[in-house]
Amino acid sequence: MACLYCGDGTYLKNPDEVSRKLCAMVNKLKPDVVMCGPCFNYLNYGKMAARIAYDINQNTSSKAIAAMSDDNQETINEYKDKLCIIKTPKKGGIGLNESLEGMCVLAKALYQEKEIEEFKEKILFLGCCLASFLLGGKKMWGIIATWRMAVEGISEASHILQEKGDAGDAIETAIKAVEDFPYYKSVGYGGLPNEEMEVELDAAYMDGNTLSIGAVAAIKDFANPVSIARRLSKEKVNNILVGEGAEKFAHKEGFERKNMLTDRAKIHYRNRVKEVREQEIKPYAGHDTVGMVCLDQQGKMTSATSTSGLFMKKKGRVGDSPIAGSGFYVDSSVGGASATGLGEDLMKGCISYEIVRLMAEGMHPQAACEKAVNQLDHRLKERRGHAGDLSLIAMNNKGEWGVATNIEGFSFAVATENQEPIVYLTKNKDGKCIHEVASQEWLDHYMKTRMAPLEEK
Ligand code: SD4
C-alpha cells in the first residue's frame, strides 16, 4: 500500500484514544506513507490531523504527512518545524477527491517512476468517519439548526440522541425549547405579529424513514405548533392544516392553548409601525425562523421548522417553513435540509429538496448547500433584479453537515457524536461559505440584546 488517508475529527471527545488506535492500525498495515488531513470541513480542523501525523511519526515506522489549507494557519504554525505539511489550495478542506489527487501527486513524487493512476488503486481511505470506526463502532448522530437561538434546544436534543433516543423526539424537544423562550422574536411564544397584531405561526415536521409530513400554517394561540405538525404527520390524509382548521384539530387533540402575543412583541409591533411610517423601513426586516435536521443512532433522520413568519406579514400569509421541499426536506437514505430567509424567494427554488437531491447525487452537504444557494441567488438576480435572504443548513445520513447563505453573519448551531454543541457564524465569500466559531463576546452580546429592556418609541 502506498498511502493511507485519515480524516480529521478535531472535535473528537477522545483524541488520545483515536491517535493510539490509529497508530496501532498503522503498525499493523505498515503503509509507506500516511496522509492526514481534514476531509471537507472548515476552521482549524487540521489540528487533529496534524496531531495524528505527529504521533504516527513518533510511534510507527511509517512516514506521516499532514495536508491542509490556509484555514488551519494556527495548526500550520504550531507544527511547521515538527512535521511535513502540504498546503492544499482548497479553502476549507482537502475534500475526498482533492486529497486522493493530492496523495497521488505525493506518491508520484516519492516513487518517481510510477504513474499517478497506479496509486489510486493502492490507497486506503479512512475518511471522516474514521473516528466512530476507531472508537468501536459507535453510531453517528447529529443535529443542525438555523440561528444561534437553537443552541440550547440542540443541547437538550443531543442528550436524547446520545442515549440512542429517537430523531423525532430529539427534534421536537429542540424546536419546543425555541418556541417556549419568550425573547426569540420569530418563533412561538413572543413571536412577532402580523399586520393586524396577531401572532400567526407556521410549523412542520418530516420523518425521513417514512417520508411522512405534517404541517400547520397561520395557526393562532397554541404553545407548540411543531408538536401539532408532528401529530399531523401520523395521519393518512389531512396532513397540512391552516388557520381555524388547524386550531380545531389542535384543540380536539388536547394541545396546550396559549396566548402567544407577549407585551414585548406588542412594543416591537408599535415601534415598527412608527418606524415604517417615519423612516420607510421595510416591515419585513428582522426575522429568524428555526429549522433543523436530525440524525439518530438508528439512522433515522427528521426535519422540522417553526416560525411566526415575516414580521407584519398580511393576515393569512404562508411562508416556506410549512412547505415540504422549500422550508425543509429529509430522506433518511440521503440526508435533510432546512431553510430560513425570505419564504417567497426560498420557495422559488424548492431549495431544501434541491439540496437533498444534490446530496443524493453524491455531493457533500457543504457543496450541495453552496451550489443550491449560489444558483438560486444568481437566478433570482438575473430574472428579477434582486434575491431575498437565503440561508440553508443540511446534514447527510453520515452526520456530515453543510451550511450556505447569501447574507452576512448567518448564525447556526450543530452538535454531533464528534462535536459538542457549537454556534458558528458564516459568510459567503465569492460563492464559498466560511464558517467561524462564534466568540464568547458575540454570544454574550446576542443574549444581552435579545433580553434588553424594550422601550416604546
Ligand atoms: C418565512 N422563511 O415565513 C420564513 C421566515 C424566516 O428567518 O425564515 N425568517 O418566509
Image: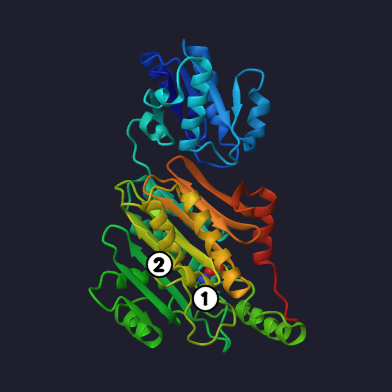
Looking at the image, the residue that sits furthest to the top is 61
Q: Which image quadrant: the N terminus?
A: top left
Q: Name the residue at 52% across, 29% down.
A: 102
Question: Picture coordinates of residue 338 (x, y %)?
Answer: 46, 62
In this rendering, position of residue 227 left or right of residue 391: left
Confirm or reject: label 1 Cβ below 8 Å from ligand 1.
yes
Quadrant location of the C terminus in the rendered image: bottom right
Q: Residue furthest left?
A: 236
Q: Is residue 224 visible?
A: no
Above or below 115: residue 180: below
Three-letter amino acid code of the residue under disc 1: Glu
- C-alpha gap between disc 2 and disc 1: 13 Å
Circle 2: residue type? Gly
Mark 1 burial class by Cα count in 10 Å: few <14, some 14-19, many 20+: some
Residue 433: image location, x then y, percent: 59, 51
Question: Which residue in the protein does label 2 denote?
Answer: 325
Quarter of the view holding residue 445:
bottom right
Tell me if mark 2 has few (under 14), some (14-19) or many (20+) residues whose alpha carbon lies within 10 angstroms of its own.
many
- Residue 6, given in percent of the width and then of the height, sits at 45, 28
Residue corresponding to mark 1: 344
